[in-house]
Image (cartoon, rainbow, N blue to C red):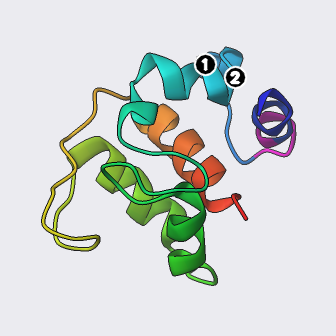
Amino acid sequence: MKKIAALLVMGGLVSGSVFAAPVDDLLKAKNCLACHAVDKKVVGPAYKDVAAKYKGNKDAVALLAGKIQKGGAGVWGAVPMPPNAVTAAEAKLLATWVLSQK
């Protein structure tokens, strides 16, 4: 996961000092793993399932980044995802990483 964060920064997908922390550290710090896992449903959907659902959607990064920041409901069932205390840049990095899961 650390390599993904470095590649995203070097590839120009994201920029700024906020990305000094690797994605896996951000996932832990923001408590994302309390409700999500890469390959299985926990409270929320598996990251692989989210990536599959939005595959080919050119607006997916912005859409998911918004949901990460503001929360969401109804897409994956009755349990809503609460808003998360992340910056727009952190949300974009997390969304880009989630969409890279296969």
Find residue 94 and report its horizontal and vertical position in percent: 54, 42
Asked which quadrant contains residue 88, the reply is: top left
Task: Please name the residue that numbered disc 2 is placed on.
Answer: 22
Find residue 12 and report its horizontal and vertical position in percent: 78, 44
Q: Is residue 92 left or right of residue 10?
A: left
Q: Inspect the image, locate mark 2, and give the three-letter code of the amino acid beneath it.
A: Pro
Q: Which mark is residue 6?
A: none
Compared with 33, 29 (above or below) is above
Q: Which mark is residue 25?
A: 1
Category of crowding for the residue at label 1, using alpha-carbon neighbours closer than 10 angstroms: few (below 14), some (14–19), many (at least 20): few
Residue nearest the viewer, comparing 48 with 56: 48
Helix, strand or loop at disc 1? helix
| Image: magenta residue range | 8-12
Q: Inspect the image, locate mark 1, and give the three-letter code of the amino acid beneath it.
A: Asp
Q: Are marks 2 and 1 in contact (CB under 8 Å)?
A: yes
Q: Is residue 16 left or right of residue 40?
A: right
Q: Residue at x 51, y 79 (%)?
A: 53
Q: Residue at x 30, y 42 (%)?
A: 69
Residue nearest the viewer, comparing 7 with 26: 26
Asked if residue 9 lies in the magenta stretch, the reply is yes
Asked which quadrant contains residue 45, the reply is: bottom left
Helix, strand or loop at disc 2? loop
